[in-house]
Amino acid sequence: MMNSTPFRMFLVSALFTGSQLMAQDIHFTQFDAAPLTLNPAFTGMFNGAVRVSAIYRNQWVSATMPYNTVSVSVDAPVVTFKNGSYFAAGTQLMRDNIGDGFNSFSSIASMAFHKLFGYDSSRISLHGCDLAIGFQAGYAQYASGLNASNLYFRNDIYIDHYYLLLGNTVNYYLLNTGISFSQTTGSRFNYTIGASANNINQPKDELLKRQNELSGLDKRYTGIAGANWLVTNRVTISPSVIYITFSTREDYIAGSEFQYKLTKHPNANGNIPSIFLGGWYRTGNTGMVTAAYAFGRLRIGISRDFRSDEPNYGGGFEVMARYIAPGSKKSSHRKAIPCNRF
């Protein structure tokens, strides 16, 4: 297997695009299940006491070595002030695996301050704004367990073992920051816009910069806009657009999710079960479909993406779960947090 042509071709293409591999975290199809990867300012932006999210992604299933990603995050408002503003904190763990030879791991601590304003004293008008500033610090590692002496290539393929990271481990620290603004304009519409910068501590030394590019440490900038529109008492439309730029590449995701409430009135526990269906387009002729079911504070979803120009690509498959623990009466004023989709 090690000296097979398909394996050699896949290995070379995968390693020489290492920066794209390490940037897959932002390419979750169900991106609302990994809010801390989108923007540090989204830390704690939800209705409740604690949010726990987990997502698993499998892609390149038709390749010799499939690509698997697991992400788990926990965040919560930890300090609430008298005026309704609050400070939130959280953490995220993520691991990537490419077959048995390559893997990466990252651990990030996230925090954000949310300034709420525009609400009346009784907080019942459902009009208000949330201006948030977030910051993240973390540690990441990229490692190769392959032995280069066991690999065979054609004589005309030049391989630099150092740059390919064969048998090497790269460790680095991450610094990210972001800002977001959300507004509720009534009982039927709210929106969020935001921008973030990842890997802002990228070294300036050219040799280190070359290493970091192959490890995925290029500075990455993300812009996002989304809204929730309650069309009827049972139907909500949630369009979103995400724009990402890193190194010399630009990506975007655009589409919408549709929510349908299965009942008109909440049950004894105040819950209304809902189903969600979404359709999205991503740069590179990639189409994405999502489906989810939510009951109470638990949401479970699946998704599939595929490239129209490469029918044998195999696409990617995801499964996610998110649970939001209910908040106390003391924090009930946050019921009007705008656009907690993210």
Image: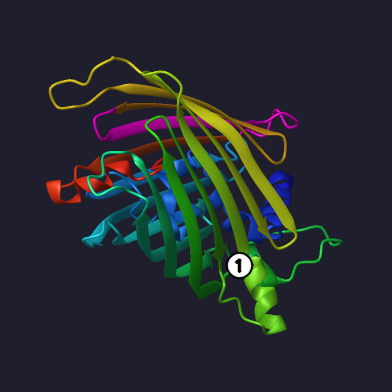
Q: Is residue 299 left or right of residue 96?
A: left
Residue under the point 64% across and 53% down: 244
The image shows residue 9 at horizontal and vertical percentages of: 73, 49
Residue for badge 1: 215
Please indicate, yes or no, whether residue 22 appears anywhere in the rendered image: yes
What amino acid is at disc 1? Ser
Image position, residue 50 (x, y; %): 24, 50
Q: Is residue 134 magenta?
A: no
- Against 165, is 324 above or below? above
Name the spot of residue 183 as percent of width and height, x first: 44, 45
* Closer to us: 329 or 55: 329
Q: Which residue is at a point 12% across and 22% down the rendered structure image? A: 268
Point 31% across, 42% down: residue: 336
What stretch of residues is rendered in magenta?
295-315
* Residue 75 vs residue 65, the one in the foreground: 75
Seen in the picture, residue 112 relative to 31 is either above or below; the reply is: below
Residue extending farthest to the bottom is 205
Q: Residue furthest top?
A: 263
Counting other residues with Cα less than 10 Å from the Cα at mark 1, is it few (<14), some (14-19), or many (20 or more)?
Answer: many
Q: Is residue 301 magenta?
A: yes
**Residue that sits furthest to the front in the current view:** 121
The residue positioned 73% from the left and 32% from the top of the image is: 310
Quarter of the picture holding the C terminus: top left
- State left or right for residue 94 relative to residue 261: right
Where does residue 140 sit, x and y in percent of width and height?
A: 47, 68
Tell me if residue 278 comes above or below residue 5 in the rendering: above
Callout 1: SS? helix
